[in-house]
Amino acid sequence: MKLFDVEYMVSVIPRLIPSFFEVTLLCVATTLVVGSIFGFLLALCKLGKNRVLRGVAYAVTDVIRSMPFIVMLFLLYYGLPKFFPALNALNKVYFLTLGLIIFASCRLSEIMRSAYEAIDKTQMEASLSVGLTPPQALWHVVVPQAFYIALPNLGNLLVGMVLETALGFTIGVYDIMGTARVINANEYGAHNMEIYVAAALIYWVISLLIAGLTSQLEKVAKKDRQGGGRKRLLKGSEQKEGVA
Amino acid sequence: MNWEFIFKDGLIAGIQGIPVSLFVTFVSMLIALPLSFLCAMGRFKRVPVLSQLITVIGSFLRGTPLVVQLFIVYSGFPSLLNVLVQRNGWDFDPFGISPYVFAFVVFSLNVLGTLTEVFRSSLSAVGKEQTEAALSVGLNHFQTNCLIVIPQALVSAIPNICNEFLNLFKSTSLVYMMTIQDILGKVRLVAAEGYDYTEAYVVIAVIYFVLGFTMEKLFQRMEGNLKTYKAAPQV
């Protein structure tokens, strides 16, 4: 018996990759799109003036953030068909996506709120005084700066989403981890280590790609940062000019 | 909805499982904290071979799901050890290792990856002028680190450590795959009699919410107390 069959591991990788494109990519893309909408709505509630809405938004975020993902997944998978028996025939991928959307909305609302609050109020005041309407001021001045501040957190969120889809195998979704378990069962557990290490390598490559993409995006968005991303060399003289 | 299950059997079974979860969380955190601090110091001081190794391993631990790491350690290592045992004829049963050992290894490794980054960023946040000032006053490198740099770095790292502790507590819900009976395991066991799985997961969600909320409030109180020792913000 071999200690670690590298050839077998390399041969397993092409069998795991199609499940990534069929399941994981679809789940994460849908989650980002729908989660952004709900996250934006939640962030609006948190930043708004209505105290009831604010309390509800904070309570919902607190409850969902304190639950492990697997508990939420099981709650949706066992709980929803109990109240709506028609959902029993629904494809399991939808339950995984729904769980991911709920999680992503909460985290996105936190990211959006913290990024928005990190921008000085003076930016809004200045743009309003120049003559922009509030929506224009938000879209052209505040949002680009907030986006640059939020980028590292968004990258972390994306990596987290991809890694959390791996838990789908507990409800029977055939993503990378699910396919790996099926292959392992077909081989009667003879190549345990190789199959799971292959799955881990695929996830690692995906997370490295996302990290690279995020840093590239940061370089592109740097010009939207306050100050235009240029280094400031003379701090004192600028202030004196303003006073004079 | 089987309300009787929720308030009687499920809740009691869940509360019985809380010590197991907390035990795994605390021990993994205790193992990971000193190790990750050492790794962060190694990366910060740019030790030649070690820092590259730590970077690669940390990237692997943060970039792979916890489940995959769990299965590599729980399913993979006994098979590996089995091959070695059969080759060398040792008197050792790799399939008899307690699952708690695997749990501690997996969770402490996973937390190690994230905590190394936390400590590295907090060490960089202290600022070089602290080291320069301490060296100019006459302290040697070791004293500088112990008395000046590390206390400030630890204090600025505490919010992140608390956050990571909460995340670890939520991740330990996965130990049921290693046949450890924590909150999930115990409540599911009781729920299997009447197929009350929905009620079981409602109970589990409530327990996790109460525990997570309490821990968050405790951590906020602790961070408030330690705020006096925080380093001055950078200019």
Image (tube, helix red, strand yellow):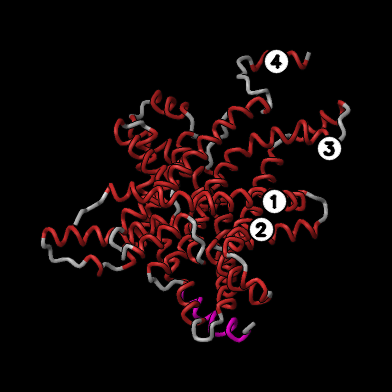
The amino acid on which the numbered mark 3 sits, given as a three-letter code, is Pro
Contact check, label 1 and label 4, Cβ < 8 Å: no
Q: Nearer the viewer, mark 1 or mark 4?
A: 1
The tag on residue A61 is 2
Q: Position of residue A117 (x, y in %)?
A: 71, 41
The amino acid on which the numbered mark 1 sits, given as a three-letter code, is Gly
* Quadrant holding the N terminus of chain B: bottom right
The amino acid on which the numbered mark 4 sits, given as a three-letter code, is Glu
Query: In the picture shown, does residue B225 fall above or below A223?
Result: below
Query: In the picture shown, does residue B2 fall above or below A7?
Result: below
The tag on residue A238 is 4
Q: Position of residue B61 (x, y in %)?
A: 40, 48
Q: Nearer the viewer, residue A114 or B155?
A: A114
Q: Nearer the viewer, mark 2 or mark 4?
A: 2
The tag on residue A91 is none
Q: Main secondary structure of the magenta part?
A: helix
Q: Marks 1/4: CA distance?
A: 40 Å
Q: Marks 3/2: CA distance?
A: 26 Å
* Quadrant holding the C terminus of chain B: top right
Q: Describe the element under mark 3 as helix, strand or loop.
A: helix
Position of residue A96 in the picture relative to residue B183 (left or right)? right
Q: Nearer the viewer, residue B119 or B232?
A: B119
The reply to whether label 4 and label 3 mark residues of one chain is yes
**Number of residues whose C-alpha sits closer than 10 Å to that of mark 2, classed few (under 14), some (14–19) or many (20 or more):** some
Give the labeled residue for mark 1: A39
The first of marks 2 and 4 along the sequence is 2
The tag on residue A135 is 3
- Which chain does tag 4 point to? A
Asked if the magenta segment contains residue A232, the reply would be: no
The reply to whether label 2 and label 4 mark residues of one chain is yes
- Magenta segment: B3-17
Q: Nearer the viewer, residue A109 or B140?
A: A109
